[in-house]
Image (spheres, rainbow, N blue to C red):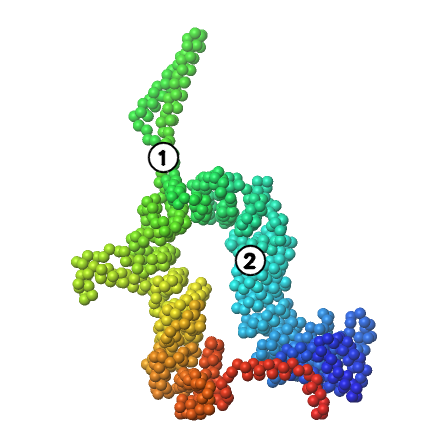
Amino acid sequence: MTGDTDLEIEEAFRRAQKAHNNKAKLAASLKNGYIKLEDKNEFHEEFIRCLKYAMIIYTREPAVENVIDFVTKFAACFETPENEEAEEEEEEEEDDNEFLNFLFNFLLESHGANSHAVRFRVCQLVNKLLGSLSENAQIDDDLCDRIHEAMLVRVTDKYPNVRIQAALAMARLQDPNNPDCPTIKAYMLLLENDSNPEVRRAVLSCIAPSAVTLSKIYKRTRDVKEKVRKLAYQVLAEKVHIRALSIAQRVSLLHEGLNDSAGSVKEVVKTHLLPAWLRLLQGDVLQMLHKLDVENCAETAVTTLHAIFSMATSSDELLQNAAGLDERKLIPVDSLTCENVLYWRALCEFVKSKGDEGEEILEQILPEAAIFAEYLYSFLKSITQLSEEQRADMTQLEIVMTQEFVGQQLILLVGCLDTSEEGGRKRMVAVLKEILVLPNIPTSLIGLLVEKLIGILRDDTQKIQVVAEIISDVREPILPIAEPVDENEKRKKQVKLAEVRVQIMEAKQSLEECISCQDFSRAAELKDSISQLEELKNQFALEASQSTHNIKQRVEKSDPETLLKCLMMCAELFKQMSIKRGICPTMTALIESLILPSVSNPNPAVRNMAIVCLGTAALHSKDLANTHLVLLLQITQLDDPKIRISALRALIDQLLLNGLNILQDKPAPPASQSPDSPDNSNGNPKQLAKDEEESTVQSILKMLSEFLDSEICELRTETAEGLAKLMYCGRIVSPKLLSRLVLLWYNPVTEDDQRLRHCLGVFLQIYARASRANQECVEESFLLTMRTLFNAPVTSPLSEVDTSNVAELYVELTRPSSLLQSAAVQGASVHDSLAVRICNEILRDVTAPEVRLYCKTLSWLEITTEPGPATNELQLLLNDILQEVKDKYCARVIEKLRNHLNGDRCTKSASNQDTTLLALDDNAEETVTKDETKPKRAKRGQKKASTAKNGRKTSKADPSSDESDEENVPEAPPSVRPTRRAKMAALDKTKQDLTALINQEANGS
């Protein structure tokens, strides 16, 4: 090969490094020279030699990236366009295949290189080469298989960037229709298991959606990384039809996306996913709501509609789908559906939330209060009331459920009405009262109706009085009752009626005889007499029928449905009233006449609602709570699970409001009733009351602790949530209970209880970060938790818990830097006292298997090196451990920790010396420490202390980095500036172009 050609290749690579050069022209020029060559092997070798300089650089330098793009364009320019003649294709086919095959062969031979930079560039080139080929490009089957096999190996590479390029390279090699496609399987494996978020993003960007891969793409919307979730929503919006998703998946995507903690994810759902779905449905919002099944996800649908409304730029866009309203600004009752009524409600709420800006629009979509009241009454009155036989018919049941949902949305619209006008407000109150008394109103609408009624009324006394009157009308309606009649009077009237009938018969017989005798005058008299007797007979018959007339009076109803409605109204009343107001006589009457008798009702639903009412009412009065506290405690242990949970919630609410001293107001028992014991032998009533209160509190806590082991999942979860609330609010400070909650969180038995896991996971973080006192409680529970785990039998689920992970959790929870309000706390930190506890635990038995974990935990702690009693005590304990421990790993960790404490102290004492005494450094070193290794250990400890803020990762790497530490002993203490300069020098080195390297190699040859 001639020297001119050599210069041409090198010159092309030199120019390709510059961004301003046209790489297409360079590739075309180089191609012309390549075509003219007869022997192309030397060209291939020289081309690869120049390419290798770029392939050994791992960083994404602009010059290197330009070279890679140039190589891609040069290889792609050999592809023959489709419109050229077949003869021309046949002539150049051999040349094309020769260069492409040579380049691919070189890349495939190099993909297993030891250098991660080479592997990265190989995968990058394969990706760009395959991407640059046209849609109908063809390559050799064997070559395609080799590329496929190589990239399948590289997607498991150690370095994420290599895996990313390999995944992108396989994008055109996947077959979505083949369930056994190895590329699809590799993609799904990476999506599920790869720890690097960028790799998961790369796979999401190139994986083809299919019946097999759709579930994997859907799961990435719940990824821990914001960027991955964002891209997953974009892929679903651009590549997946709404019909390909199930109803549950659609609802989940909208619910989780619009409520995501990251604003960018919410924005993608709002600006990409929703518009894409609407385009597929021709912009029909009601059709999209139908795809979501709004009856079972009303709140998600409302959030979705609000997101759609927020993208509207004018009021006309908001009103374009409100065409279903008639001239009364109402949807005709016959046209009401779940979708259009929910859309109406969401639109009204959205416009009302705009304040004064939306008043004009709201007037166009909502009528006056009086008109809407009549409209609401006419619909709710028509709701079908099913009998027991009809409830077994699913068709009838679905119709009624739809009616209830529509009624619920119409009731919610009451909150958007303008009730400032007196006439409209009075009419709405009157209509709501009439609706609540209707017998066909479902119990699911009672609470909502009462809430809207109380919201319209303004005076608290009037609210209580109106609801009490409605409860009275429902429970004791006015019904017609038959009045009892005296039997003697009834018999006399019947005798008179019989006599008249006999007289009529006799008169008719005489009339016939007179007519036969032609005595017409007598016949006329008898006819008049018969007429009078008929009138008298009718009069007596009417009196007999009216003898059993009905009278109207109130009749008390005690059926479960009526009691349930009354209790629901009562519960809503107590819920809406302020607890500062206390219990009025009307409320007391409701408690005594309705709530307390219903507690013992045989119907479980009535009992449950009665417990809810009693617990809510007890929040208004501490005396009432004291009176019925024992009843609530009994119900939590004896009744049905659902009722026990309601009683437990009432108990937790009481403890949250009043604390554990709720029993202080109980009267003290007389001294004569106290048992003989050393504590109360003096017969002091106050002491006896205090002892009784403490006993009751301990009983309550013991009961709650037992509920944590309950087999009833809901009861266990409710108890754990209640204890978490009590501890976070400061009502309970108990390391034992905190240890129980941590163990419950880690217990494999609760793995499927998502609510429990989520609740405890959030609680542990916010509780430990709230205050120093909470961190001290966490610290006290550490050894309790670890001992329980270490002593758990093999048959216990706790034996499967990773104790190292539990220790890491405690270290993170007690880290001083994690406090929300970090104040300068004098004295030892929580980690210092935790270190002392762990050291004492190690000294109990230095041969125990858990000593290794305790030593490892010590290396994770941020221990204060300031001189003080805690530091001195810790050093003494560390010395004792070093004398007794035999395990080499433990001894090494303890020695590191001890040298860390001593080393920082030495460094601080040296730094405090005046600069004028620098000449005496050697003498000062001899004074500080006599051991030559101590300054070296001090530097190690200092380095470790400087990186202690890095958290768990730094502490984990310490035990395994002993050799590197020893190598760094002679070096000076690390400083910030030299490290930064070294980094800048390395960056400058990589930014150099490849010309110098090529010239150096050429001169050397």
Which quarter of the rendered picture does the N terminus lie within? bottom right
Residue visible at 52% across and 39% down?
371
Q: Observer-nearest residue: 731 or 603?
A: 731
How packed is label 1: few (under 14 Cα within 10 Å), some, or many (20 or more)? few
Q: Observer-nearest residue: 493 or 506?
A: 493
User: Dot 1 corresponds to which residue?
Assistant: 553
Q: Is residue 382 above or below residue 73?
A: above
Residue 848 visible in the current orientation: no
Locate residue 369 relative to residue 837 in the image: left or right: right
Residue visible at 54% across and 59% down?
258
* Mark 1: amino acid: Gln
User: Dot 2 corresponds to which residue?
Assistant: 247
Residue visible at 36% across and 51% down?
580
Which quarter of the rendered picture does the C terminus lie within? bottom right
How packed is label 2: few (under 14 Cα within 10 Å), some, or many (20 or more)? some
Residue 478 position in % (x across, y down):
38, 36
Q: Earlier in the sequence, mark 2 or mark 1?
A: 2
Identify the image quadrant of residue 739: bottom left
Residue 74 position in % (x across, y down):
74, 77
Q: Is residue 567 above or below residue 952?
A: above
* Mark 2: amino acid: Ile
Residue visible at 36% across and 27% down?
547
Residue 167 visible in the current orientation: yes
SS under mark 2: helix
Residue 630 position in % (x across, y down):
29, 56
Residue 618 position in % (x across, y down):
34, 52
Q: Is residue 894 above or below residue 414?
A: below
